[in-house]
Structures are given as C-alpha cells and as structure tokens.
Amino acid sequence: MNSEITYAEVRFNNEPKSSGAKSEPPSDKAWSCCPKNWTSFSSNCYFISTEAVWDDSEKKCSSMKAHLLVINTKAEQDFITQKLDKNSAYYVGLSDLQGKNSWQWVDQTPYNESATFWHSGEPSDRNEHCVILNFRSLPRKWGWNDVVCNQRQRSICKMMKIYL
Ligand SMILES: [Ca+2]
C-alpha cells in the first residue's frame, strides 16, 4: 500500500476541538492529512477493506499502520456508515476471543457499555467472538452483531491523521 498524500487539511488553532476524541491532535501542528483512498473524520482516517476473516482483517490494517475500526462515538459510527454498503457487513476491532463476554477493542480502548451500539438481541452467542457492523431493516439502522471470526467479511481500518 503506497501512502501518497493527495490532499491536506488546515486546522486552525482556534477551531473548536471535537469532543470525545480519544487522541487530540498535537495543537502546535497546523497541517494534517490521510493516505490516498482513505477518508477523514475528526482526527482520524478510515479505509474500507476487502473480505477476509477477522484475524487477517486486523493484520491487513496493521500492515498499513492502522487498526480495525474502534468506534468511540455515535457521531463517528454515523459518519462511517454513510460510506458503507447496506448489503455488506464489516468487521470492526471488537472481539471476545476467550468467549467470556469480555469485549476488547484492538487498540486497548476500554470497552464502555454506555457507548455500544449492539443490534437488539446482540451479542447473541458465546461462540460468536468477533463483531461486525451491519444494517438491519427492522428497525432500519446500523448496529453491531457478534459473529464467528472465520467468516470472510469486509472490514474498516482506522488510523490517526498524519500531522505535518
Ligand atoms: Ca450474533
């Protein structure tokens, strides 16, 4: 994956900072950007990746210096889902690999019950250790579902913006 930079954004120091961001951008840096073909939101960059099992999806993200998507806010999820195909499912960086109902984000962000967006009835099965983001029509919304980790699914990678 090349990391050619195709555009940059200017962030003024007096611009209000987005709330809830886990990592605030360095305040003394004025220019930030995302790699080619990535999309930007707040201080992060996102990439929609091709089908793979959960493990390999995380490896693909890591090879691009990113992680599977860690969802910190509803606003972030709402932004990213606008870019997704309602007929696909996308792995995110949340798993319970031990099957102990102990959900872990790939970047060690603490799992916060009050910022979870499970579909109704999910998580549904102790044998389903990995999480996808998908669209359900009743009610019409995007949400999370635990699934087995060896299904091939599309996925979303996330990295912090690059500050120049
Ligand atoms: Ca499930």
Image (tube, helix red, strand yellow):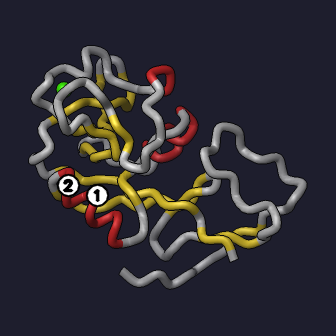
Tell me the residue at 56%/81% (across/down).
5
Q: Quadrant of residue 30?
A: bottom right
Q: What amino acid type should be assigned to the residue bearing mark 1?
A: Glu
Where does the image place residue 131, in percent across and percent down from the top left? 26, 37
Does residue 124 sit above or below 13 in this rendering? above
Q: Could you tell me how far apart the alpha carbons at marks 2 and 1 are, in whole angstroms?
A: 5 Å
Tell me the residue at 22%/31% (across/down).
146
Image-based side of 146 in relation to 49, left or right: left
Q: Which residue is mark 1?
A: 58
Where does the image place residue 26, in percent across and percent down from the top left? 73, 62
Mark 1 vs ligand 1: CB below 8 Å: no
Callout 2: 10 Å neighbours few (<14), some, many (20+)?
A: some
User: In the image shown, does 111 or 5 lie closer to the viewer?
Assistant: 111
Q: Quadrant of ligand 1?
A: top left
User: In the image shown, does 49 or 70 lie closer to the viewer?
Assistant: 70
Q: Which residue is mark 2?
A: 55
Indicate which disc residue 104 carries. Answer: none
Q: What amino acid type should be assigned to the residue bearing mark 2?
A: Asp
Q: Quadrant of residue 128?
A: top left
Counting the numbered discs, the total is 2
Does residue 90 sit above or below 3 in this rendering? above
Does residue 94 sit above or below 27 in this rendering? above
Image-based side of 26 in relation to 91, left or right: right
Image-based side of 27 in relation to 107, left or right: right
Where does the image place residue 36, in percent across and percent down from the top left? 49, 76
The answer to the question of whether label 2 and label 1 lie on touching residues, with beta carbons closer than 8 A, is: yes
SS at circle 2: helix
Tell me the residue at 55%/61% (across/down).
160
SS at circle 1: helix
Tell me the residue at 69%/77% (across/down).
164
Q: Residue furthest right?
A: 14
Q: Quadrant of residue 86?
A: top left
